[in-house]
Amino acid sequence: MQNKFFTAEKISSYVTRITGLGGENAYLIEGSDRALLFDGLSGVGSLKSFVRELTELPVFLVLSHGHPDHEGAAFEYGQCFIHPDDIGLMYSEFASSVQSRLGYVSAPSPMAPPKRTALSVEDVIPPAPVKTYPVYNGDIFDLGGVTLEVVAVPGHTRGTIMLLDRAARTVYSGDAINLNTLLGLYGSTTVEEYHESLLHLKTLQKDFDLLFGGHGNEPVPASIVDDAIMLCEKIMARTDDAVEDISLSGEPCLIAAKRRPDYLPEYGGYSNIVYTKDKIFGKKGPAILQGKPYID
């Protein structure tokens, strides 16, 4: 199913991946009683209306984190589940403004589909108050026959979460871990903190085989966790490739592993990390299980 803003594709009997114009993904996961929408894309076009065409079940929204390409539908639904550490980020000008979200889907991206329509500010859901419900590591969403477990992975943002479907041996990972994991952004942790998060994720690795991410069409294997741990350790030891680049905010940054023309890392794994020199070491946030909002 497709309209001018979204494309929907079934990836299992009860999960539909919805892709926005910037190549960002959301996942509609349906149980017998209710449906969970994991991530809200950029808010360009009415995702709420599109989802209503896909299911008759009551739907609630859970955000993987508070960035502009994942939170957009929160302003439509008027409520969402989000880790408290990302609530401030969700309301920031960087994440919530119409210009920021329109700019995201309009920018060239190797992961974005061909543009199907001209866009304007009238296509963007404006920011609005959102009733937020806190979600923490270990929380369970029971959809009726489908159970999803929250896994906190501070790194890309302090409030980043994944959802683990143990029965399907599948993780819906948002931007927590991928071939372009961005650290060093506003709201990101240090590499050292991200490494600790990955060690926590490693304890759950036996429970999943595949990760479906917030960008890209193909799932990645669970071995990406080992790849990311290895890269963090190389960064901290100053033995990574440290390829110089410019970040999304226009600041100097480093890429941990050299890239092939197809964007995959040269070393043959699936993870890559983009970071800044000033955010390698240090622990500024709470422990994963502490369940308290981070205050800078």
Image (cartoon, rainbow, N blue to C red):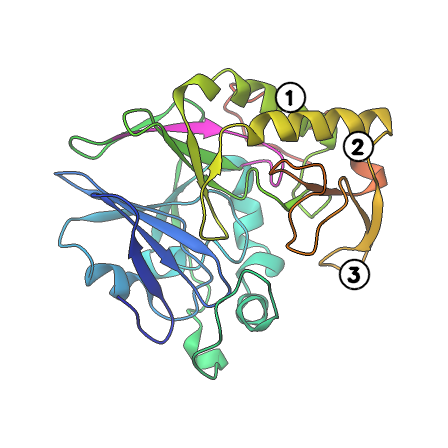
Residue closest to the eye, 134 or 66: 66
Regarding residue 252, the answer to whether it shows in the image is: no
Which residue is under mark 2?
280
> Is 180 placed above or below 137 here?
below
Q: Check if residue 157 falls in the magenta segment.
A: yes
Residue closest to the eye, 142 or 271: 271
The image shows residue 110 at horizontal and vertical percentages of: 59, 62
Estimate how packed mark 3 is, as few (under 14), some (14 to 19) or many (20 or more) residues with alpha carbons within 10 Å. few
| Mark 3 or mark 2: whose residue is earlier in sequence | 3
Which residue is under mark 1?
196
Q: At 39% from the left edge and 52% from the top edge, which residue is drawn?
A: 26
Name the side, left or right, on which 262 lies relative to 105.
right
Q: Check if residue 111 falls in the magenta segment.
A: no
> Is 77 placed above or below 199 here?
below
Q: At 48% from the left edge and 48% from the top edge, which residue is drawn?
A: 214
Q: Quadrant of the N terminus?
A: bottom left
The image shows residue 5 at horizontal and vertical percentages of: 38, 71
Q: Which mark is residue 250?
A: 3
Circle 1: element type:
helix
Regarding residue 211, the answer to whether it shows in the image is: yes
In the rendered picture of this protein, how many numbered marks are placed on residues? 3
| Mark 2 or mark 1: whose residue is earlier in sequence | 1
Q: Quadrant of residue 282?
A: top right
| Mark 1 or mark 3: whose residue is earlier in sequence | 1
What's the amino acid at mark 1? Glu
Q: Are marks 3 and 2 in contact (CB under 8 Å)?
A: no
Name the side, left or right, on which 171 lies relative to 270.
left
The image shows residue 273 at horizontal and vertical percentages of: 69, 40
